[in-house]
Amino acid sequence: MLETKDILETIDMIDNENLDVRTVTMGISLLDCIDSDIDKACDKIYDKICRYANDLVSTSDSISREYGIPIINKRIAVTPIAMIAAVCQTSKIVKFAKVLDKAADTVGVNFIGGYSALVEKGFAAGDYALIESIPEALSVTEKVCSSVNIGSTKAGINMDAVRMMGNTVVETAKLTKDRDCIGAAKLVTFCNAVQDNPFMAGAFHGVGEADCVINVGVSGPGVVRAALAKSDCKDLSQVAELIKKTAFKITRMGQLVAREASQRLSVPFGIVDLSLAPTPAVGDSVAHILEEMGLEICGCHGTTAALAMLNDAVKKGGVMASSHVGGLSGAFIPVSEDAGMINAVNNGALDITKLEAMTAVCSVGLDMIVVPGDTTPQTISAIIADEAAIGMVNSKTTAVRLIPAIGKNAGDTLNFGGLLGEGPVMPLRKGKPDTFIGRGGRIPAPIQALKN
């Protein structure tokens, strides 16, 4: 039974500490939309998305009003489009991106994810065509997000795909340079991608999922920071305990929204992703949580240890609050979306090398990092390979979302607006990885893969 003090505490979190449900994401399978005629397939996709998601936005808004809980985004994730495109005898598959964008606009969601390919062990029919089409697809659409999984602990790393993604990221940035290279901000390269992630730009509806599900992503870095600021914790064991209790409260709210949305839409409840997802808003920063633990500034020595503890405590606290926890769940460290991270970069305390170390213990990886516009595709590919290696060896999800700022250099700023915020252009390390990336082939799976 809810107590009055718990209700009042939650109201205070919402009003003063940026607590919200970051997204209600409907996952929709498109496997029954496959057709060798691309036009017929697109018609089926549009009809199914509009039929299933017609009430998604209105229902989410109704829940938000009734419970006083801000629901920031309503999104859709679909089956990786490379699978749908596999039987189409054409390489002109941008039609799929356009129909996804049209459907997203019709039902009123913020983003639609799933313009994706899973190529960790090799390329199947449809994969090459999809990856090659990504730059155009993201330049001619507004709401479509794309992802490619290039590695896993079980399969190793597909270095041919890594090489392709370096070119894809650069070309996508160039085609959208008149919009602050926004296309690259909607493109993620994964290792160990998960099938039930509700967060963009990496969301897709995995083939092991039900025909349609509701996944919810909660947030609340500001709540955790405020709890630490008001506490009198003497040691790190007490800090971890406080974070666990706070994560439990945050996740319970997400569970409530997920259950209500599932019932009202007559769609099965999938998972609650209990990740701490920051925003550019003052006080809503993962970096500020780390600083509240006792670091002078995010990025100084001790940052990786503090982040590891935060990530673990969030998972331990949240897992008891929901019947099904999934997605990525933990702490995100996107630079442009986190005011504290931006401050740390601008003050010289945080660089891409330290961020890479931090990704070994957080939820995802190198996220929303703006790099100089003249960065070569080979260097982008090498950064992707480094991050994929961390994920592969540690059996965790890692991702890379880099935005080459065309025409800008280190020290400049790229402004996306909204939840994507703005990002300082960060310098990269010297030296060329061209020969290494040019070799292609596969990096074999590590010994950890032999678990059966």
Image (cartoon, rainbow, N blue to C red):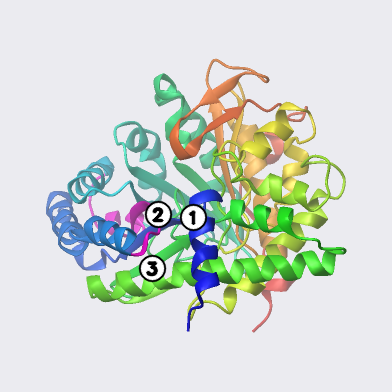
* Quarter of image, res 349: top right
Dot label at residue 14: 1
Residue 398 at what x, y percent from top left? 62, 55
**Residue indicated by mark 3:** 257
- Depth check: give the residue in front, 425 or 236: 236
Real-space Cα distance between discs 3 and 2?
Answer: 10 Å
In the image, is 123 to the left or to the right of 151?
Answer: left
Amino acid type shown at disc 2: Pro
Q: Which is more toward the observer, 46 or 385?
A: 46
Q: Looking at the rendering, in which quadrant would you find the C terminus?
A: bottom right
Q: Which residue: 34% across, 33% down?
A: 136
Q: Is residue 356 left or right of residue 416?
A: right
Q: Are marks 1 and 3 in contact (CB under 8 Å)?
A: no
**70 within the magenta span:** yes
Which tag, 1 or 3, sits closer to the chain's start?
Answer: 1
Q: Residues within 10 Å of mark 1 (few under 14, many from 20)?
A: some
Q: Which residues are magenta?
A: 67-90
Give the number of the disc on residue 70: 2
- Would residue 39 be seen by someone viewing this image from the given angle? yes
Q: Secondary structure at mark 3?
A: helix
> What type is the residue that disc 3 sits on?
Val
SS of the residue under disc 1: helix
Residue drawn 72% across the image and 60% down it: 310
Percent of width and height locating residue 247: 61, 67
Q: CA distance from mark 1 to mark 3?
A: 14 Å
Sequence-earlier tag: 3 or 2 = 2
Residue 126 shows in the view: no
Of callouts 2 and 1, the N-terminal one: 1
Q: Amino acid at mark 1?
A: Ile
Mark 2 crowdedness (10 Å alpha carbons): few <14, some 14-19, many ≥20? some
- Disc 2 to disc 1, C-alpha distance: 8 Å
